[in-house]
Amino acid sequence: MEKIARQGLLYDFYGALLTEHQRQVYEDVVLYDLSLSEIAEEQGISRQGVHDLVKRCDRILEDYEEKLHLMEKFGNTKRLAREIQSLAGEFSRTGDRNLLRRIEEISGEIIDLEAH
Amino acid sequence: MEKIARQGLLYDFYGALLTEHQRQVYEDVVLYDLSLSEIAEEQGISRQGVHDLVKRCDRILEDYEEKLHLMEKFGNTKRLAREIQSLAGEFSRTGDRNLLRRIEEISGEIIDLEAH
């Protein structure tokens, strides 16, 4: 995954655990793609300060994911849902009953997924 | 949801963010259903101490859920997966094509679910 995409996802999952200030700066970088200089000026801190703050936020968010793996789990769920969608489409075309059984199995996998 | 079931779920999702000591005591209460006295003896702290620790863990875990809502989101995903499973079963019996379309729609809903 591209770095900026991963940062965006991590922020979606765990951003609420950052401070208000961290969130502002991290959003400017990750969601609004502002330059370090622009953010530095806006926030009244140095470019290096912005850079360090972003690094620190990366670390904090990665630490949460390392402990909780919730982004990974959600990714697995979506992969399974994509599989169901494609099997349903294939079944519409072919009428192969095995595909229907696969759909029931995969939805069962989602239901049985544990958080830990 | 019953209190003990909610505690178990919260622990599944966010337990990794508690300290080792908090985890031990919380597991004794929530997963192994030991009495406060048993845990107090085992841990060498007072019954009141165990009680306070469990309350504090409840608060910490609820705070994470309040901020992140990941348990709630996972619950929604599972509900949708259960719906898919039941629609697939119903389709097997009735052959109603609308059910198949519903399955594609619902898997799409899971795919589009956002973390925030």
Image (cartoon, coloured by chain):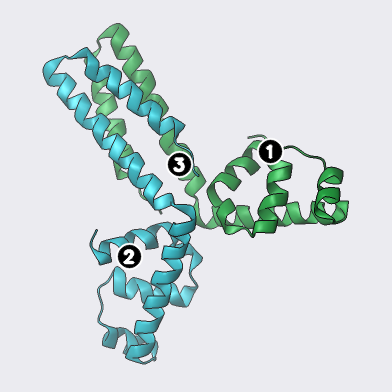
Chain colours: A cyan, B green
* Mark 1, residue position: B4
Q: CA distance from mark 1 to mark 2?
A: 35 Å
The local crowd at label 1, few if under 14, some if 14 to 19, many if 20 or more residues have their Cα within 10 Å, is: few
Where does the image place residue A19, in percent across and percent down from the top left? 50, 73
Q: Are marks 2 and 3 on the same chain?
A: no
> Where does residue A48 sit, x and y in percent of width and height?
35, 89
Spot the residue most to the top: B93
Q: Relative to residue A101, is residue A10 drawn left or right?
A: right
The residue pinned by badge 3 equals B74
Indicate the quadrant containing the N terminus of chain B: top left, top right, bottom left or bottom right.
Answer: top right
Residue at (39, 83) in percent of width and height: A52
Q: Real-space Cα distance between discs 3 and 1?
A: 18 Å
Q: Secondary structure at mark 1?
A: helix
Q: Which residue is mark 2?
A: A7
Please state the chain letter of the residue tagged with numbered disc 1 in the rendered image. Answer: B
- Indicate the position of residue B34 as horizontal and vertical percent values: 78, 39
| Chain of the residue under label 2 | A
Q: x, y (%) of residue A73? A: 40, 45
Give the quadrant of residue A95. Answer: top left
- In the image, is residue B53 above or below residue B77? below
Label 2 sits on a secondary structure element that is: helix
Whether residue B98 is visible: no
- Can the viewer see residue B82 in this picture? yes
Q: Chain of mark 3?
A: B
